[in-house]
């Protein structure tokens, strides 16, 4: 057994139907965990479930809209009921589908991005927190973004939401540490997924983004899953309140 082994552990991953969420869910299973898969596309979730079951691990689908607080409570209850308990909770659901100057952002668009990227994390933590604190163990991983660390013109709405996720992570890490519950942020740089297709489709936007990355490329979703396993496992047993940046060097320039 290694420090990265997740045998006997259970995980809930939101936004697990594709991209980074799917890669993390499968990586957890490869390291021995059973996984509850959240998302809205049940057909895609069934594909992930089949892949994990093919690895010999248990996978359950807990479809829900994470922007609906009541649905989130039902999702968490369903995951706990199906898996017996939760050891790992990954708030991965999120994304951004548009770029616009701050003054051009409509209030409705701003609110939608906040609800998906920030409020969903708040509601999941509210729903699962009592369970983890009662068990006096657990690892919560909130997926943020480099957009929350520095200025990203045309995406101030997204950056603001992710910066708030980083702040919430630090606060929960301090508040929950007494119970042995660790809370960390995983901070990807620019990753080639369906959710970033809008940026990759615009040559000017893609060039502006990647020109600042020392490694001069997009990350793959799988390159984010290894750091997630680290944060979920005993390999990071004394790590809490940390922002683990995986960005190809973007934030060091």
Image: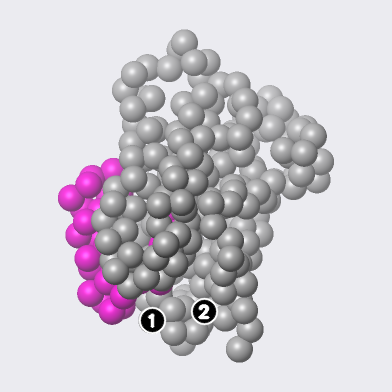
The image position of residue 15, as x and y in percent, is 41, 54
22 displayed left or right of 214: left
Residue 7: percent from left, percent from top: 49, 84
Residue 135 lies in the magenta-colored region:
no
Is 47 located above or below residue 68 in the figure? below
Disc 2 and disc 1: Cα gap in Å? 13 Å
- Residue at (35% x, 60% y) in the render: 38
Helix, strand or loop for disc 2 = loop
Query: Is residue 87 one of those drawn in magenta?
Result: yes
The N terminus is located in which quarter?
bottom right
Q: What residue sits 40% from the left and 57% below the top? A: 176
> Which callout, 2 or 1, points at the residue further toward the start of the chain?
2
Residue at figure coordinates x 23%, y 45% from the top left? 68
Q: Is residue 184 visible?
A: yes
Q: Which residue is mark 1?
A: 58
Q: Examine the rendered structure and indicate whether residue 62 appears above or below residue 72.
A: below
Q: Which quarter of the rendered picture does the C terminus lie within? A: top right
- State if disc 1 and disc 2 touch (CB < 8 Å): no
Local secondary structure at mark 1: loop
Which is nearer the eye, 186 or 210?
186
Image quadrant where residue 132 sits: bottom left
Task: Look at the image and tell me whether residue 88 can be seen.
Answer: no
Residue name at image x 52 percent, y 67 percent: 232
Which quadrant holds residue 2? bottom right
* In the image, residue 88 above or below residue 167: below
Q: Is residue 135 left or right of residue 21?
A: left
Residue 66 versus residue 42 in the image, above or below: above
**Span colored in magenta:** 64-92
Q: Position of residue 160 (x, y in %)?
A: 48, 29
The residue wearing badge 2 is: 6
């Amino acid at each position: 057994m290694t420090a990265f082994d997740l045998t006997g552990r259970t995980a809930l991953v939101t936004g697990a139907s594709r991209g980074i969420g799917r890669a993390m869910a499968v990586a957890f299973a490869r390291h021995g965990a059973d996984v509850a898969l959240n998302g809205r596309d049940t057909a895609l979730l069934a594909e992930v479930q089949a892949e994990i079951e093919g690895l010999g691990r248990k996978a359950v689908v807990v479809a829900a809209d994470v922007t609906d607080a009541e649905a989130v409570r039902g999702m968490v209850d369903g995951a706990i009921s199906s898996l017996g308990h939760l050891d790992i909770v990954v708030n991965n659901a999120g994304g951004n589908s548009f770029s616009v100057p701050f003054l051009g952002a409509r209030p409705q668009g701003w609110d939608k991005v906040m609800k998906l990227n920030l409020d969903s994390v708040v509601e999941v933590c509210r729903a699962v927190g009592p369970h983890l604190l009662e068990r006096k163990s657990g690892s919560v991983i909130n997926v943020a973004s480099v957009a929350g660390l520095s200025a990203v013109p045309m995406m101030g709405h997204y950056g603001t939401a992710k910066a708030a996720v980083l702040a919430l992570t630090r606060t929960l890490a301090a508040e929950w540490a007494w119970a042995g519950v660790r809370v960390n942020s995983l901070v990807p740089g620019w990753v080639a997924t369906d959710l970033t297709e809008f940026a990759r489709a615009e040559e000017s936007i893609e060039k502006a983004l990647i020109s600042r990355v020392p490694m001069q490329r997009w990350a793959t979703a799988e390159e984010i899953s290894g750091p997630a396993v680290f944060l979920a496992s005993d390999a990071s047993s004394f790590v809490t309140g940390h922002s683990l940046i995986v960005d190809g060097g973007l934030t060091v320039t």
